[in-house]
Image (cartoon, helix red, strand yellow):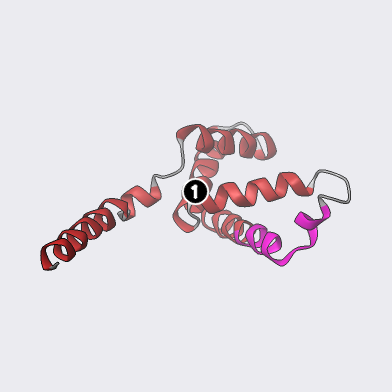
Amino acid sequence: MRCAAAGLLLVLAVAGVAGAQTVSERLNDYPTAVRADYVFACMAANGQGQDVLRKCACSIDHIASVLPYAAYVEAETVLSLQLTGGERMSIFRTSAPAKALVAELRRAQAEAEIVCF
């Protein structure tokens, strides 16, 4: 019994260590394509110069440091669903959880704008 319990604890400890992210891993959990897409959209809105490229890259880096990638994806999904018309999509425009996801992304974007622009 003790051996089985000790084995279970060891498995759980190893799984916990393997599942834990370091700061570096958390800051780099955004795929490169997502970062590039953000920078392209940012540059389309703010200009095409080298200085704007640096500012837009800084912006997504700051957002990535504040918001985990999963939360970013959820917020972006809610934002795109809010643009879809129809009664069924109103849940994404009116529900508190959906509003909270978008507010968290907007807060991260506002911080990034202050820091980077």
Q: Tell me the residue at 75%/63% (across/down).
A: 95
Q: Position of residue 102 (x, y in %)?
A: 66, 57
**Residue named by callout 1:** 69
Residue at (34% x, 48% y) in the render: 25
Q: Nearer the viewer, residue 33 or 71?
A: 71
Looking at this view, is 6 or 49 the one in front?
6
Region of the chain picked out in magenta, as a range: 90-104
Looking at the rendered structure, the number of numbered marks drawn on it comes to: 1
Q: Is residue 92 magenta?
A: yes
Q: Is residue 56 magenta?
A: no
Please tell me whether the stretch drawn in magenta is mainly helix, strand or loop.
helix
Front one among 102 and 89:
89
User: Is residue 117 at all visible to an observer of this figure?
Assistant: no
Residue positioned 31% across, 56% down in the render: 20
The residue most toward the front is 1
Q: Residue at x 16, y 59 (%)?
A: 7
Residue 104 left/right relative to 99: left
Amino acid carrying label 1: it is Tyr
Q: Please provide percent x and percent y for residue 15.
A: 27, 54
Image: 48 above or below 58: above
Whether residue 110 can be seen here: yes
**Residue furthest left as drawn:** 3
Question: x%, y% of residue 48?
Answer: 62, 31
Q: Tell me which corner region of the image, top left, top right, bottom left or bottom right, holds residue 23.
A: bottom left
Residue 26 is situated, as x and y percent measured from the top left of the image, at 38, 51
Q: Quadrant of residue 37?
A: top right
Q: Is residue 88 left or right of residue 6?
A: right
- Local crowd at mark 1 within 10 Å, few (<14), some, or many (≥20)? some
Could you tell whether 11 is left or right of 90 in the image?
A: left
Quadrant in which the N terminus appears? bottom left
Q: Which element is circle 1 on? A: helix
- Residue 36 horizontal side relative to residue 24, left or right: right
